[in-house]
Image (cartoon, rainbow, N blue to C red):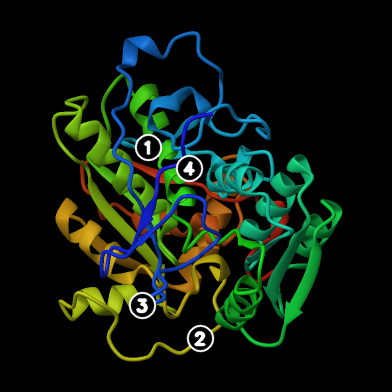
Amino acid sequence: MTPLPDCFCPADGTRVTAQSLAWCCPVCRGPLDLDFAPTPAPLKSLGGRVNSLWRYAETLPLAGPSVSLGEGRTPLVELTDGISGKLDFLMPTLSFKDRGAVLLAELALRLRPRQVVADSSGNAGTSIAAYCARAALPCTVYVPEGTSPKKLEQIGAHGARIRVVDGDREAAARAAREAADEPEVFYASHVFNPYFLHGTKTYVHELWEDLGGRLPEVLVLPVGNGTLLLGAALAVAELFTAGLIGRRPALYAVQAAAVAPLAHAWEEGADDLVGVTPMAPTFAEGIAITGPPRARQILRAVRQSGGTFLTVTEDQIRHAQLDLASQGLYVESTGVACWAAVRDGVLGARSAVVPLCGAGLKTGLAGG
């Protein structure tokens, strides 16, 4: 079996051995990155490979998957001239989180904890629960009060224990982190664990393959904790460094105007979060994160790409969801945020792809 790469703290350089169950930097308690710089395979060598995200084996830190549900390889559909949507709501658990969850489950199998814990407003929890069920790993998911009943039903159906935490998304995360500090517990964190990012980056590797070895001028990405955007930045860097693309696309990060700490920091020209952002109601519950732990990395990735931040109102989200439904695509309210941000022509003539991240059956219609 291929050795696991070590982790390191991007803030202070502290290294964490590959076999450790430590979920954060032992010095600063910040999120970890992976000491892993792969070289993607050229386009012509991908034909005939397995039709899942595991076809990009050279770029993944784990080999020989045993819990795959066929995740990845979601289709592109044109939404308007120059802008396509990638249908990641067609994943096995109906959200893009499967890209990272499968790697966390594979990692947990190798580390053999007595318990897996996760925290989520819904989609990550359902995905972790499903892949832990596939791997026969005991799993507990901490969720905030008010989580969609359909998402809770899905988590429970996979056999995971559900712990509903009084308070918001951040309160659920704190409870999970307390549990993660117990011995022999694996924290399947889509925020702190870098393996998750190396799963989400396959979103861009798929785009590159499906677009014939190129990428659009703009990648529009929803940002709460930033796992899809940071994964995208990883993939872009890998493809560019390998000489497989000639230019890097701009990363456009989208937040709900109601909860937009990163967009506010961007407007202030800051390198990190500015002040305290209060939680507020929003249809885009999945990206309503007031204090993302990887804020500095997100802001840096957007800045280095030549991108920007966009925010969307609740009315824009509601109308975008109905617009997509009128085109035959029933997407959850968080998952329509990127389309809400760009459907009125803000990108001009530039080509772009937006992710449609979760199925509408998970939440129903915004305001419905």
Name the front one of labels 4 and 1. Answer: 4
Circle 3 — which element? loop
Local crowd at mark 1 within 10 Å, few (<14), some, or many (≥20)?
Answer: many
Distance (Cα) linking label 2 and label 1: 31 Å
Q: Which residue is drawn at 32% across and 39% down?
A: 235
Query: What percent of the width, then of the height, locates residue 304?
Result: 15, 55
Q: Which residue is drawn at 27% across and 32% down?
A: 215
Distance (Cα) linking label 3 and label 2: 25 Å
Counting residues from the N terminus, which is met first, the one under dot 3 or under dot 2?
3
Q: Quadrant of residue 118?
A: bottom right
Where is mark 3, residue-wise? 28
Query: What percent of the width, then of the height, locates residue 140?
Result: 75, 64
Contact (Cβ within 8 Å) of mark 3 with mark 2: no
Name the front one of labels 3 and 4. Answer: 3
| Dot label at residue 311 | none
Q: Residue at x 66, y 51 (%)?
A: 127
Local crowd at mark 4 within 10 Å, few (<14), some, or many (≥20)?
Answer: many
Contact (Cβ within 8 Å) of mark 2 with mark 1: no
Q: In which quarter of the image is the C terminus?
A: bottom right
Circle 4 — which element? helix
Residue 225 shows in the view: yes
